[in-house]
Amino acid sequence: MAIWAELRRRAPRAAETLALGGVLLKESGAADAAVPMLRQALRLDPGHGTAARALMDALEGLGDMAGAQQAGREALAFSPADPELWGALGGLPAAADQSRALAYCRRAVLIDPDSAPARLRLSFVLDSGGQADAAAAAARGALVCDPALPAAFFQLVQLALRRGEPEQAARHFLRLARLAPGALSSRLCVVLGETLRRAGKPELATAVALTGIAALPEEPRLLVLLGTVRAIGDHDGARAALEAALIRDPANALALNAIGLGRSLTCEAERAVTALRRAVRADPSDPQVHSNLLLTLQYSAAIAPDEKAALHMEWGRRHGAPEIPERPARRARDRGGRLRVGYLSPDFYAHPVVAFLEPVLAHHDRGRFQVFCYSTGARDDAVTERLRGRADVWREIRDLPDAEVAQRIAEDGIDVLVDLAGHTGGNRLPVFARRPAPVQVNWLGYPDTTGLRAMDYRLTDAVADPPGLADARHAETLWRMPGCFLCFGPPADAPAVAPLPSLERGFVTFGSFNNLAKLNENVAATWAEILHAVPESRLLLKAAALANAGTRARVLGWLAVRGIAADRVDLLTTIASAREHLGLYGAVDVALDPFPYNGTTTTCEAAWMGVPTVTLLGGTHVARVGASLNAALGLERLVAPDAAAYRGLAVSLACDLPALQALRAGLRPRMAASRLCDAAAFTRSLEEAYAAMLARARP
């Protein structure tokens, strides 16, 4: 700067001196001071290309894009073969129009085909114009010119994520990390890792988390990511990562949230609730963390129903609209008079919800109803493709913000919008708070109120939610379906019902294939008493969480202190094949329902495989689903009013093997003939419910 000051003293109006001064000011961050000096230089020498290029950059830095474009075009008049100038002009944000920006960038590549920056700039412009495939090709072209260009890998990661290709994004990310670990950001690591986790790619998600931690060891969000992705298969490793995150940030709501969810998976419901309460206090603004607390409350026997209801209502007050938004005007019917029903869910894949939703999608009367599905999940599979074929209109909305989703639903003219997630993971309840449809209904995915005043109805039945207290504990109006509130679609590839295993083996096997979060010490104690009452009997448990040694030890410990040796207990983890999973029921004589959180899909699968389920009748929906399902099958005798009766029912079934074999042999035909599997009748009732709800809505 001293040299420039001396030059300006000797020749204050010389174009070269002014241009040099402007460049130096721009590069020192003083773009506002550089602009008048550069303009003065160009007035003295209109052909000064350096001044024109510097002016373009300075104006861009100040946000004057129109001025920057004009300066760039003036510079081109004097440097028409400068590829960097063409590329810089094309890469200006808010270029005059997309076609002109592309023309500039393509001209830069044409002048210098070996320029990696020119090809990368072309990729950015293509991407901004929504041409993701062409943008990816241009970025790959940049890597041909410069195989070690970090920005190109970064661009490919972003493009792959937006195109729904998380595995491809992970490959580019790991190459970027090897080349330039300093280019990684915690946000990129977390977004990619979470996307991989939700897409069912835990190994790649773990690799991303570990790579991020190596590059950014002090970033607690990456430790939270590692703890989250390890939560299923490596509880101990997950907990260690999360506790390390809390050391760095004791009030980290995401770490506390993940610890709570992890403890739930390892049968520690009360400690899970404690951690999640802390998470909500740490970040009261996060609706999903608050939802996770509500879901975890369902597993706890220590929380009174009125307290659970109050906490759900608090969610609605905090995260829903303070006042119910104005109900949208009812749509004028199209010429066919069809009612539009929309189903919104993160679980349109091989998920338990599908077993109850798909029969309805298959049997909707398309003459009366037009079916929309709004998919918010990150996981697609063969089931997803099948469900797409069941919908009249399929919308992928996973990456859209809540307000935009609500706007899309309103524009679609949905009459009845059905939430299939409640407070489970990936829910979009804030969409319903915006009331995009005149009638909004909760069904299937969650066993309690949403707490949301804008949710008009919740579908249930008189067994699962008897009239009375249940109504007072809901923000929604309870709509009780005739019979059961569920309709089960039996798996098409289920093996035949096996003979009663105890007749061949000489001992009775009790079993439960439920999510292990539903198991607690009281349940284990009751099951131990059943095993004591039936000599030589065994217990078979199957759950994903049993892959963890600590969890297995906890379950076996509960049974051991009550006199049940480990050699009487078989612990199995996830089996990839659905057919093999169902085949395992061939080793079970009697299924035991957990409490207070009953099974649903597991109870239906067990019945289809000929295995009856003994259930304990509780006081809330979550503890009465087993009773509803058994009532639908005409097996009310398997519903116990208290723990003593529950033990007695299980023992009596095990002590009368001929009767148990007869029940087993007839259970699948009984179920197939029941209303529980009568999809056509159930769907007609559901459609009548939708029509009646809409008729009650204000015109």
Image: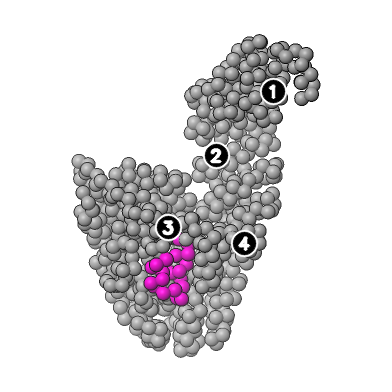
Distance in Å between CA atoms under marks 3 and 4: 24 Å
User: Pointers 2 and 1 in contact (CB under 8 A)?
Assistant: no
Looking at numbered disc 1 in the image, what kind of residue is underneath it?
Val
Q: Residue at x 33, y 74 (%)?
A: 627
Q: Which residue is mark 4?
A: 250
How crowded is the residue under tag 2: few (<14 C-alpha within 10 Å), some, or many (20+)? Answer: many
Q: Earlier in the sequence, mark 2 or mark 1?
A: 1
Q: Earlier in the sequence, mark 4 or mark 1?
A: 1
Distance in Å between CA atoms under marks 2 and 1: 34 Å
Q: Which residue is mark 1?
A: 23
Vertical order, 280 against 55 (above or below): below
Q: Is residue 591 magenta?
A: no
What kind of secondary structure does the magenta stretch mostly adopt? helix
Q: Which residue is mark 2?
A: 159
Looking at the rendered image, the quarter that the N terminus falls into is: top right
Looking at numbered disc 3 in the image, what kind of residue is underneath it?
Arg
Q: Is residue 267 left or right of residue 684?
A: right
User: Pointers 4 and 1 in contact (CB under 8 A)?
Assistant: no
Per the rendering, the mark at residue 318 is 3
- Span colored in magenta: 291-311
Task: Look at the numbered disc 4 and give the secondary structure of its residue.
Answer: loop
Q: Residue at x 54, y 82 (%)?
A: 559
Q: Residue at x 71, y 12 (%)?
A: 14
Q: Residue at x 78, y 13 (%)?
A: 10
